[in-house]
Image: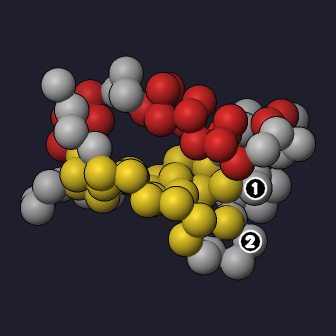
Amino acid sequence: MAFASKEKSRIKMVALTVNGSKNVTWYSPERENHRDDEYIFKNMLRRFSTKPAFILTNKVRFYDAKSDTIIREYSVKPK
């Protein structure tokens, strides 16, 4: 089983970056599909905050992976 996949993950995270940088898209871990949304958001943000692309991020949006509707949006101010 894959860690995350476009077809089987429940949540999609899109990190909107500063101009000139490519936006980052991640899918929630398949093993977390049974968890509530807040748990998934928190853990995806925690994992993403350790990546170099985080310092270029302005906003993070979470979408329902199936319907592509926005569930939540966070403004990010990297340290």
Identify the amino acid type marked 1. Arg
Q: Quadrant of residue 67?
A: bottom right
The label on residue 10 is 1
How many numbered marks, from 0 up?
2
| Distance between the alpha carbons at the discs numbered 2 and 1 | 7 Å
Q: Which residue is mark 2?
A: 66
The quadrant the C terminus occupies is top left
**Which element type, helix, strand or loop, lies under badge 2?**
loop
Residue 41 at x, y percent in the picture: 58, 42
**Which element type, helix, strand or loop, lies under badge 1?**
loop
Query: Residue at the spot x=83%, y=34% of the render?
Result: 31
The quadrant the N terminus occupies is top right
66 lies above or below 17: below
Specify whether 8 is left or right of 77: right
Give the residue furthest to the left: 19
Residue 30 visible in rendering:
no
Identify the amino acid type marked 2. Lys
Q: How is the image coloured?
A: secondary structure
Specify whether 24 is left or right of 57: right
Residue 65 at x, y percent in the picture: 68, 65
